[in-house]
Image (spheres, coloured by chain):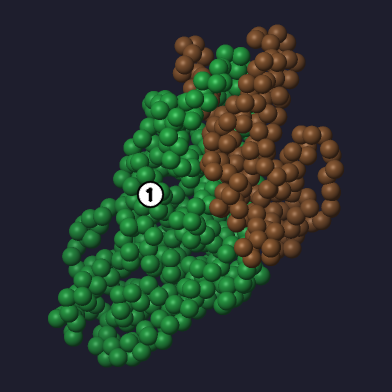
Amino acid sequence: MDPELEPPQLQFRSAQMGGAFDDFHGLISPPQVTGGSSFTALLELAPPQAVELLVTEDFPAKQPPPPPIFPTDIGLIHRASKFSVFASADNSLESNAILSVSNSIPVKQEELDADSRRNSSSPAGSDQSLKSGKRKEREKKLKESNKKSKSKAANDDGEELPYVHVRARRGQATDSHSLAERARRDKINARMKLLQELVPGCNKVSCHNCLLSIIVSSMGSNCGDYLGLIFSGHSKRLAPLTKCICRCVVQISGTAMVLDEIINHVQALQRQVEFLSMRLAAVSPGIDFDLDSLFTVNGSSNDNSYSGMFAPPICTEGQLDGARQLQLQQLWHCDELHQSVWARETDTSNFIAPANSLLSYDSTSANSGKPVAPRCTTS
Amino acid sequence: MSSLSQNPKKTLSFSSTMKNPNYNPLKKRLASRFLKAMGRLKCKMSPFPATIEEKRRRHRAVRGAAYASMASAVGPRRAWSRALLRKMKGRKRARRNPRNVDERFGLNLNQLCDVVPGGEGMDSRSLLNETAHYIKCLVAQVQIMREILHSSSSSSTTL
């Protein structure tokens, strides 16, 4: 989808949507009783560190060079064995192999409600509220890869049994492809390991669910932002990924919460219309509306409508970067605001670019000034 | 196109994605309509509202103009815009099916019906579609209004 995004990460992130949320959902549903935005509470300490983790591209460099020497954690070793066993498969199949791994993890099915059961177990991807065509493809891919990875696992089983020595390159050292692949895998596994240590309660589930949930939670403390994003992004480029995210959000936090967020979002927007109309009514005799029409037409509306629509819900939440200058020339470009939103959330400017790439925002102009309101209305 | 004949819901989404009747993107249409409406309002309004009641009336007028322009810009393609237009014209022909649209998700679709205009007589799937489009238009409208405010406040020296 997005060329900026590292392909394998995107691959496994998109591949894992296909099935294996049930275990994570089973994990989440007890803490949901605590209320509120449950998964953010669950991952509350994760976002800042995880963000740094995701962002810092020199992460493997920071780590000591042989990262995956799993010391004592048996569960960790088990997971690593699964990774190494299945990861001897092809490059392109790795994501699906990991998905098959996560599927093989025993699923806690007792607490799933009908929704998630339907979502998770319907093989054909029954017609839920979101289109499931993409899921069908993923399911098919998963089945193929299961066969392939199993056969390869049988082949490589002999050499992978001493899986503690992950870096023992027996029989693979000569192949440059596998070397590179192994390095990449090690990088990913190291990051996963750290993520799992950071995120409480994520130890029992597949790493990629954790990763995704971290991304989801760190993108916005509020589901509503995401939903505004999802609903606003009607463009085709964004549709698959937003659908994935939406599905993920629904699975993680349950449909009731999602609906609540939708309702809150709509109500917040209506409130905004109300306040803005009040302000406009107060100011309006002084406004020359024809002149405004000239401005708005001239202002090049490259439809960053997507990112533009993302802006207002964040605006109400509060403190924006008030230092932005009003620039009438670029009325519709919201990238600046966009970035300031993320900066507000995470306080790292590094996060902005990966965040954009992660969600494949179509931000054509990265640094155009958006007339951000120093929104100092106290209603 | 065969899809057009099959399913009215698909027709709606298809045409909205293709933006068939509207070459202009949504924002431009919303902006132009809203500005026209505000221009019309401005003629009627007195330059300095004396009483609070006048202010409130103006406020309501602006809000009504906002919603009306939004609905008319979208046109009758969407159920929520039709419902809004009906409300504006005063025909309270609201088909109030007390139908708990609880089929699929169960819980909060009733609240959603209340919030989104025209949410009464719809099943859950179309309700969510309408909500999505409604959110999109609301967001665009909010942005337009905000930008009008800012352009006016920046052009005038005093706020």
Q: In the rendering, at what x and y percent does residue B97 appear?
A: 84, 52
**Left or right of residue A356, residue B22 in this image:** right
Name the residue carrying label 1.
Answer: A356
Q: Secondary structure under badge 1?
A: helix
The quadrant the N terminus of chain B occupies is: bottom right
Q: Colour of chain B?
A: brown
Q: Answer few, some or many: residues within 10 Å of disc 1's Cα (few below 14, many 20 plus, some between 14 and 19).
A: many
| Rendered location of residue A358, percent (x, y) | 38, 54
Q: Whole-percent x and y of residue A267? A: 65, 40
State the residue lying farthest toward the front.
Answer: B1
Residue at the outermost left position: A174
As shown in the figure, which amino acid type bears the numbered disc 1?
A: Asn
The answer to whether residue A201 is seen in the rendering is: yes
Q: Looking at the picture, tell me which residue is in the foreground, B140 or B73.
A: B73
Residue A42 in sight: no
Q: Who is closer to the viewer here, A294 or A229?
A: A294
Q: Can you tell which quarter of the image residue A247 is in?
A: bottom right
Image quadrant assignment for residue A130:
bottom right
Q: Nearer the viewer, residue A276 or B6?
A: B6
Residue at the (36%, 52%) spot, across then down: A357
Q: Position of residue B113 (x, y in %)?
A: 73, 49
Q: How many dots with numbers?
A: 1
- Identified at 38% across, 32% down, the residue is A369
| Mark 1 belongs to chain | A
Q: Decide if residue A291 is on the left or right side of residue A150.
A: right
**The chain drawn green is chain what?**
A
Looking at the image, residue B99 lies above or below residue A375: below
| Residue A43 in the image: above or below residue A312 | below
Q: Nearer the viewer, residue B69 or A279?
A: B69
Say whether residue B145 is left or right of residue B124: left
Task: Tell me the residue at 48%/78% (across/down).
Answer: A140
Q: In percent of the image, x 39 and y 45: which residue is there?
A: A363
